[in-house]
Amino acid sequence: MIPDFDYQGFEENLTNLSSEFADWSESDWQKSSYTSWMYALESLIYPTYFDEYPEFMQTLAWQDEKLNTALGSWAQLRHDTILYAKQTYIPALICSYPEAFAEPNPTFYSRMQDLCERTLGALNILEPEEVNSTITDSLQTLKDVTQKLEVISEKELAKEPLTEEEVDFIKELVWNCGSGGFIGWYVDTIHAIAQAANSTSTLEVPVIADVATFPPDDIQYPPQILHVGTGYVNALVVLFPKPDGSLVAAVGPVFSYYEFNLIGTERLNDDEWKEMLTWSNRTEYLPEQLQDVYGLAEPMPVPENLNFTVFAILMVSTLTVLALMKGIKIAKKFERTKRN
């Protein structure tokens, strides 16, 4: 493996790009669907170690997880496809949740609203027969959802209790009682997009993309290709504070992100990646900065006042980036057509 700083001009290029993007205004970020998406992801890695945030969001582990989410979404964009959450990762019998909270990230939800609106605007310029109405309906639903979640997250940060309607909205994300599939507004939205896209894949497709190639003409290092990808959706457990100060254990879905160099000149495809990736070897493909996310560091102590009620927490920073992919692809296609 080639150390990053051994690449010619790495430090200089990194510094120049960092300076360039630091000078971008909001209008610069919104020039295309791709950069608008990056602008939304940028909000995920904002510092959250302030008193207004729950304690679990003030930890380095949480910053690692948000980096994991942002990179997972970027890997999806590089692959230019859509990933669906594997339904069977949710417990087999979920008739109701005793509690429900949303991940409090109002800036992210606000930027996702803007992205939905911009994508809808691009799609509306196309001829009606060119756009499946299910796509636009789903994008409108996601815009409405993120608007509600922005309000909910602001109330959570202010330590204000949620209304019964707001709690019910989160609980209706996805649920199952007895045999059969899962239902809920997230499931309805994601399956509608899959149907509109004529997707024949299963709901658990890891994807892989090659993003950089080190050519076979260097005498110091062998040829190798940098791959980035996602795997199956993981479950994250956090200690979420209720308005009265008590803590409860909460679980929600999060991205899995992988990054590794493959020696040689062969590029992996999705089928090969899916065959390679197993439960036992998945940590071998992790970038060093995300090792802690998979429990490879020292465990944290458990607070004495923990309520061990387990409930669903809505990790929308993962779910919304999954559901929006198809609409973004169509908008990007339109933008390319318009430029040509």
Image (cartoon, rainbow, N blue to C red):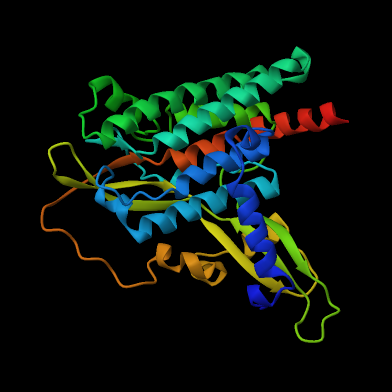
Q: Is 81 left, or right, of 237 in this rendering?
A: right
Residue furthest bottom as drawn: 219
Tell me if residue 139 comes above or below residue 35 in the rendering.
Answer: above
The quadrant of the rendering that contains the C terminus is top right
The image shows residue 87, relative to residue 17, as above or below, that is above
Question: Which residue corresponds to the image point at 65% horizontal and 36% vertical from the top-left?
Answer: 28
Task: Place residue 285 in its image quadrant.
Answer: bottom right
- Vertical arrangement, residue 235 with respect to residue 340, above or below: below
* Percent position of residue 194, x then y: 62, 32
* Image quadrant in which you'd find residue 31: top right
Question: Can you name the residue that lies furthest to the top here?
Answer: 128
Above or below for 310 versus 223: above
Q: Is residue 3 visible?
A: yes
Instruction: Find residue 131 and report its horizontal and vertical position in percent.
Output: 72, 20
Residue 130 coordinates in the image, percent (x, y) = 77, 19
Rendering coords of residue 178 (x, y %): 34, 35
Using the rendered image of the protein, determine whether residue 135 is visible from the camera's viewpoint: no
Q: Is residue 233 left or right of residue 26?
A: left
Quarter of the image with the N terminus in it: bottom right
Q: How many marks?
A: 0
Which residue is found at the position 58% from the left and 48% from the top?
A: 22
Query: Front-most of 331 and 100?
Result: 331
Q: Residue at x 49, y 55 (%)?
A: 68
149 left or right, relative to 327 = left
